[in-house]
Image (spheres, rainbow, N blue to C red):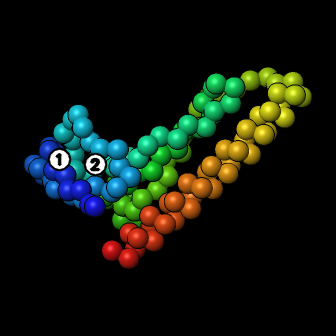
Amino acid sequence: MKRTLSLATIDHETVSLTEPSWCTGHTGQVPGYRVDICHTGPEHEFAFEGDTLLIATLTQDPFATDAERRGTGLYVEQTGWTATLDPAEVRKLAASLTVHAMHLRTLAEQLAAIRAVEVGE
């Protein structure tokens, strides 16, 4: 079921738009410019030994000035994690990165399915 929401903006008063099913909502969003409206999905944390290495989330900027950016994408942020590791720790990190790569591939497939629906709309 598609949800319609209305958001206050500085430059276009109230804007109504359809919210993707994966969006976590806009509660408490401070009015800004229409071009800055962004749908954001749940955050996926990629960690090693309790430290965050990457964060990834589905995003969509429906009013982006660049039409290519209006479709859904996967926002990926790399943290500034650094460490000096011994051989065993390097192996553990490599194993963790392998699992994270599998998770990223899963997110890529979800993103491909979302984009296929967007193209069909």
* Pointer 1 residue: 7
Disc on the earlier residue, 2 or 1: 1
Given residues 108 and 64, the one toward you in this image is 108
User: What amino acid is at disc 2?
Assistant: Ile
Q: In which quadrant is the N terminus drawn?
A: bottom left
Q: Is there CB contact under 8 Å for labels 2 and 1?
A: yes
Amino acid type shown at disc 1: Leu
Q: Could you say where residue 79 lies in the image, as x and y percent from the top left?
A: 59, 32
Write down the residue under mark 2: 37
Q: Is residue 108 left or right of residue 16?
A: right
**CA–CA distance between discs 2 and 1?**
9 Å
> Looking at this view, is 30 or 20 the one in front?
20
Q: Tell me which residue sits at (67%, 44%) in the image.
A: 100
Q: Position of residue 12 (x, y in %)?
A: 13, 52
When the figure is inspected, residue 14 is found, relative to residue 108, above or below; the finding is: above
8 left or right of 72 in image? left
Determine the secondary structure under disc 1.
Answer: strand
Q: Residues within 10 Å of mark 1 (few under 14, many from 20)?
A: some
Q: Would you identify the image quadrant in which residue 27 lies?
A: top left
Q: Residue furthest right?
A: 87
Please, is residue 40 above or below residue 118 in the view?
above
- For the question of whether residue 63 can be seen, the reply is no
Q: Quadrant of the C terminus?
A: bottom left
